[in-house]
Amino acid sequence: MNSAAFFFIAVLTLSAAVAAACLRQLVHAALSFAVALVGVAAFYFLLGAEFVGLVQVFVYVGAVAVLIVFTILLTRHGTDENRGFNWSGVVIALAVLAALLWAIMRTPALYVAAQPGVTVTVRQIGEALMSDYVWPLQCVGLLLTAALIGALVLVLEEKR
Amino acid sequence: MAFRCARGNAIPVLLKKSGLAFLHRNVSGFLDQIFVLGKQWLLSFLAGAPDWVGQIASSLLNISALLAVFLTLFALMSLFERKILARIQNRYGPNRVGPFGLLQPVADGIKMLIKEDIVPARADKVVHFLAPILIAAAAILALGIIPYGRNMTPFTIDGGILFFFAVGSTNEVGVFMAGWGSNNKFSMLGAMRAIAQMVSYELPLIITVLPVVMVTGSLTPDAIVAAQGGYSLGILPHWFVFTPWGAVAFILFFVSGLVESNRTPFDVPEGESEIVAGHMTEYSGFKYAIFFLAEYFGMFAVSGLAVTLFLGGWHAPFSVLQFVPSYLWFFLKLGVLLFVFIWIRGTLPRIRVDQMMSFAWKFMLPMAFTCVIAAAIWHYQGRRLSGSLWSLGWIVLVYLTLSRVLGVGKKFAPRTYRFAE
Amino acid sequence: MSLSTRAQHSAVEAPPGMPSRLDGELLEVSMGPQHPSTHGVFRMNVALEGEVVRRLKPVFGYLHRNHEKIGENTSYLGSMPYTDRLDYICSMSNNWGYALSVEKLAGIEVPERAEYLRVILAELTRLVNHASLLGFLLSDMGAWGTPLMYAFRERENILDLFESLSGSRMMCDYMRFGGCRCDLPPGWMERARKVVDGFPHFLDEFEQLITGNEILIARTQEVGKLSAELAISAGITGPGLRASGVNYDLRKVDGYGFYPRFKFRVPLGEHGDCYDRLMMRVLELRETLGILRQAMDDLPAGPIMNPKVKIRAFKPPVGEAYGRIEAPKGELGFYLISDGSGNPYRYRVRPPSLINLTVLEDMCLGHTVADVMVILGSIDIVMGEVDR
């Protein structure tokens, strides 16, 4: 059953991703991107990483996708003009893919057999975040706060 | 397995062996677990089947029970809302269809079903079609993690609370799709308003949950309900709403819930007198009904979560009343909260968008953080009376400071008038 | 302010693809004529920047039915029922305004009892109008009709009175030049007293629940301010003018009817915002109740119709006259030119709703869409009167 689910989710995620890259209408692309993000979350669920999956939905679908959609709305000017095939985009995409593949191939995790039956609870994650990883967590928090304030400052200046 | 029986398989075995004798001994316990036992009885037919068949059957049973209960509740709620609203407004309300108008929801449903489904010519057909489905699906999913009674959580997820909010946040995408897909200015305005307010009020909504999660040390709704069991002196239940931070957090949560489910006085996204129906302007027939359903399901979900987090879930208010089945307590509390929803709707005028936003950021959010700190104070003072007093003092201090800093009372006040003879 | 100088219909064309642009460009929204809270078939072409109104063009005429032209082709009596349809909430005061101008035109005396009856009925109409306005205004603010239903409870009582007196609840057609159509039915005065005595209860309840409500105050104070200068130069009348602090009430200024005989005060606002306009109505309701009590106590016996007037074959002398009354919404005037024939040569209505509506844009600019509805509601318009 798991492999069937994997196959189904993989097809869904990949086709959504391809659609996000290919669709003409920008909003459609953004929505397909959201579907792809949900697919990734489904993978996490399939792997038993509930917490990561939930955070994926929460952050990426609830926040990032909405942000993208909002940005499209607020900034769109000309629509539907055909600008020809974007070769630079293809080059960048291939470069990113190559880098990712390189990174994936180099990780040792690929060659370690997964330990079955180890479910990490939210409590454990929380404890790890609050003990071993407390500094990175605080740094990320600080960074995000700074970004928030920066965005506010930018908007306020624009208004003035 | 979602419905886990606390006493293992003891009850069904006992039931089989002693039948009525057992009933005599423990009628209330039996009634309490009647649905759980019923489900296990149904699943016992699949005893020989492979594991995954049992799992799927169990899930399907849960889903259908959930849908059946809440669709009925939706129908009843739509009727009672109209009835109660009518009483508040000095009217009778629906009383033509069936005895006391009880069949009104059926009539409404039929009306909605046979109405023409109009899709605007320039709408984005696919997005327009998918939006109500997404919104309804999100609302129904959110209902799945709430413990409706002892051992009656449809889907036990480790991070249940997180699941609730994760699913709730996809709502925004649905609203956006509805507003954008309709190709209507009112829809677009409504969707922008809706997303803006949802994003703003999600923060206080989640942050008011934090103290509960901190105090119980768990994101699982079952654990949170379990932590609220027990009574002081047999009359004072250990619900979080009876702690200072819990009371404030409950009010904040409830207000944010009002916003998230687009209810008066925060029904700005569909403000009828302003932007017709917001993102639902271009929907008709059954699609509109789906939106309606999603709105009510969202209301049930938020109220249910409020009950779970602050009102002790399915626990009885007094220890002597524990013989009443747990799910009845849950739905009674839910009903009280829903009544408050209706009551507020019949009472208050609508607030303006900018006022609502500043309310969220200037008042709700600081107060929510105050609750987190108050809960910490309460915890480190040993969760006793002194802790309660300290946290209460802290909350009052912040509240007074906030109201002084914001100075709303100075700007807006009733006036006196002069007269010319 | 002047509507004629602006194009009534702007070319609102959606750009291809997305209709709304929120990147600083204005979003043109056509609110109405089918809209839940435009008080009938009224339309506003609003240009929004985000939520803020930057331009507003009122468009009306959807309910135009040639009232004035019909008036010129009907007998003087024949126009009386038509005046009911002007401001269909206040038919009694419309009747009075028209009767007053015809009486002025032909120099007709009105019996004392009829004048008292007119005052009573016009003030009852004021109760109806102000009570429903408060309800509608709160509905526009999204209070889901609760205040409206309570206001309508009071309105129903008064409409019952109208029905038993004139045979119709809303289209009363009660007054005639030279008096009133029929005398009070038995027991009417007692019932009217009961209604008037019960009304303060509603007002107390309303003030307690609503005028101190924080949301209402936050929604109406400092919203839709109208300065006294603009109000005067635009010809605003009624509670809207008095909310800006101008002491101008035709009942005091003209002293028509028997109003000088009654003691009442005129409430005056200071800020000219929506809250003041709303409170003007509430305070006026109390004064109106005082007038009603005095009139009911003093109501003399006697004829209700000047026997010399032949209302059917009515032919006033050549001349012109402008009669005006303080209708609940403002100055309601009828301008008549007679050429000596059975129907007026020119018949013109000065509707308070239309004139008060002219400053809508000035009041709305810089406020949000939500405020537009509150402002429109606080102006108190009835489209039957605006479009005629």
Image (cartoon, coloured by chain):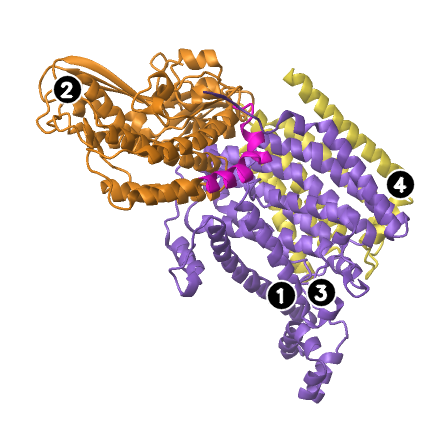
Question: Does A154 appear above or below B105?
Answer: above
Residue at the spot of label 2 = C344
Chain letter, colour purple: B
Kind of residue at badge 2: Pro
Q: Nearer the viewer, mark 3 or mark 1?
A: 3
The residue carrying pointer 1 sits among few (fewer than 14), some (14 to 19) or many (20 or more) residues within 10 Å by Cα, namely: many
Could you tell whether C49 is left or right of C232 in the image?
right
Chain letter, colour orange: C
Whole-number angstrom distance, CA of label 1 to CA of label 2:
79 Å
Q: Is residue B349 visible?
A: no
Q: Nearer the viewer, mark 2 or mark 4?
A: 2
Kind of residue at badge 3: Ala
Whether C209 is among the magenta residues is yes
Subunit of label 3: B
Residue at the spot of label 3 = B316
Subunit of label 2: C
Element on which disc 1 rests: helix
Residue at the spot of label 1 = B62
Kind of residue at badge 4: Val
Sequence-wise, the earlier of marks 3 and 1 is 1
Whether C128 is among the magenta residues is no
Chain letter, colour yellow: A
Residue at the spot of label 4 = A134
